[in-house]
Amino acid sequence: MSGVAYVLMSGALIAVLALAMTFINLAVLGRVRPGPRRGPLVSVCIPARNEQENIGGCIDSVLSAGYTDLEVLVYDDQSTDDTPRILAEMAGRDPRVRRVATQPLPDGWNGKQHACHRMAGEARGEWLLFTDADVRFHQNAIGASLEAAGRLGAGLISAFPRQIVKTPGEALLVPMIFFVLLSYLPFPRMRRTNDPASSAGCGQFLFVSRSAYDASGGHAGFRESMHDGIRLPRAVRRAGMHSDLIDGTAIAECRMYRDLATAWRGFAKNAYEGLGSVSLLVFATGLHLIGHIVPWLALFLWLTGVREADLIERVAASIAVLTGVAQRAVISARFRLPMWIAVAHPVGVSLMVAVQWWSWWIALRGRREWRGRAATAA
């Protein structure tokens, strides 16, 4: 048997295991359940830096999401657009909306983490919901989070909102977060253990109890980070409490980026930080190449007559390709993503790998930045 056959058989195994893990994880994840319309005070904390296009819609969606006992805190992070005026108007109309006083960004702090830290210091709620200005909340978002926290015994609940993608570049890159999450994080272990390495989260939706937040050290514990979605759940687990995930598709939505260029820059700022080491980056790259790129290339070369292939190579490549398409189709159906991205799977994976390596490079060079601010090394 040829070396190519061994590689393609390995690729088929990787793809099949990823599909199996996806089915297991979706079954464990389940659907959100109805929650209370009132209860403990919830402080919704929204950092805003030049968010004139988003901040009004985000606040309005929180206020109309069907939960009575809440306050909305917004930190204007030295915006240079119309954000301050919009905030002043909204705070004047509704006493539940409060502006947290802006301070100069201290040395060693990432802007978003400082904004969240400042809002947490002023929040009165028993629960804090950290979110982004481009998120829109649906009915039951807060109630469902409270219900899940009680049912799962969690001090922190995170959700991945439905990701709105309207251009091909967004659609190829943004849904890769679901592919990675469902392929590689065993949800059964995430649910039964407090191991920080088995946690995950999304910075667009971090719902944490005040006691868990304080015990974890809050955003001050990772003040330089650009990846609060990973760092806060890990901090909560290190403090001895549980974090968990729920399906946010029905309770919130977000359009993170507007095209491939902004998606590339957005993911590049923290993709390497999310992996955490060069060795894991190399391993993940090899896994993706063998399981999700090479089989497509081999099948293309065979079908176009560029290269001959024996039966084992054809079968292995076909299994890997068809399994990859099936996995992405299942993910697209569950999270209401465009179905065509299933057949563009190797393009999305290739873009993701490229972003991860670019993220490593700019972190190495100290060139990470977001919204005009440079970050410290990852």
Image (cartoon, grey):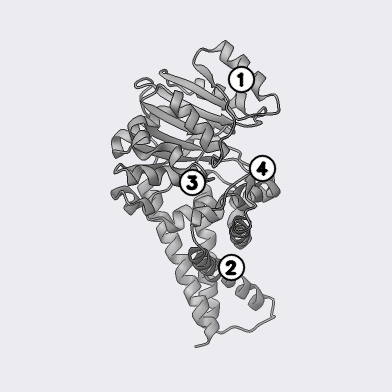
Tell which of 122 and 162 is nearer to you: 122
Q: Residues within 10 Å of mark 4 (few under 14, many from 20)?
A: few
Give the x, y percent position of residue 73: 51, 23
**Mark 4–mark 2 distance (CA, rounded to whole Å):** 25 Å
Q: Mark 4 or mark 1, which is nearer the start of the sequence? A: 1
Q: Using residue 24 as the reference point, say whether residue 56 is left or right of it.
A: right
Q: Is residue 94 visible?
A: yes
Q: Which circle marks residue 87 in the picture? A: 1
Query: Dot 4 corresponds to which residue?
Result: 166
Q: Quadrant of residue 165?
A: top right
Q: Quadrant of residue 132?
A: top right
Asked which secondary structure carries label 3, the reply is helix
**Mark 2–mark 1 distance (CA, rounded to whole Å):** 47 Å
Give the x, y percent position of residue 43: 44, 25
Q: Using residue 170 as the reference point, say whether residue 209 is left or right of it.
A: left
At x 49%, y 29%, the residue is 118
Q: Residues within 10 Å of mark 2 (few under 14, many from 20)?
A: many
Tell which of 378 and 138 is nearer to you: 378
Q: Is residue 39 shown above or below 14?
A: above
Tell which of 28 and 329 is nearer to you: 28
Amino acid on which disc 3 is placed: Arg
Amino acid on which disc 1 is placed: Leu
Asked which secondary structure carries label 2, the reply is helix
